[in-house]
């Protein structure tokens, strides 16, 4: 029986408590995922964009490339939650 938050729209604890099941485990990155490397890759890409003459354009170009991998692979390394969280603004 599935007892996480995705089960039947509940919070996941009701079904587990009723059935006497263990509490659901905390969600972690899937096997093979490189959480630290994912963030490091994003930070390096954004840093490189900030070195360009038009940092906003370069950052936008980087973000527009991300959905291709996400649509094809659907892996946490390419999740929009990661690359969509960053923003670059210009005050010039």
Image: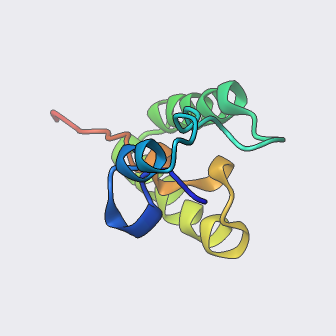
Report whether 25 appears left or right of 57: right
**What quarter of the picture does the N terminus occupy?**
bottom right
Report whether 5 appears left or right of 24: left
Between residue 4 and residue 48, name the one nearer to us: 4
* Residue at the right extreme, as displayed: 32
* Image position of 68 with respect to 39: above or below: below
**What quarter of the picture does the C terminus occupy?**
top left
- The chosen color scheme is rainbow
Residue at 24% across / 39% down in the picture?
89
Position of residue 43 measured from the top left corner of the image (x, y, whole percent): 55, 29
* Image position of 76 with respect to 36: above or below: below
* Residue at the left extreme, as displayed: 91
Report whether 8 appears left or right of 26: left
Position of residue 79 measured from the top left corner of the image (x, y, whole percent): 55, 54
Position of residue 75 measured from the top left corner of the image (x, y, whole percent): 69, 57
Position of residue 82 measured from the top left corner of the image (x, y, whole percent): 49, 44
* Image position of 15 with respect to 30: above or below: below
**Quarter location, residue 39:** top right
Between residue 86 and residue 23, name the one nearer to us: 23
**How many numbered circles are shown?**
0
Residue at 73% across / 68% down in the picture?
73
Residue at 43% across / 40% down in the picture?
53
Between residue 13 and residue 42, name the one nearer to us: 13
């Amino acid at each position: 029986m599935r007892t996480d938050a995705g089960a039947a729209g509940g919070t996941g604890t009701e079904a587990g408590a009723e059935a006497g099941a263990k509490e659901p485990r905390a969600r972690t990155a899937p096997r093979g995922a490189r959480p630290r490397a994912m963030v490091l890759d994003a930070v390096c890409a954004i840093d490189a964009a900030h070195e360009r003459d038009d940092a906003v354009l370069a950052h936008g170009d980087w973000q527009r490339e991300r959905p291709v991998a996400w649509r094809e692979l659907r892996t946490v390394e390419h999740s929009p939650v990661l690359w969509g969280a960053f923003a670059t603004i210009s005050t010039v």
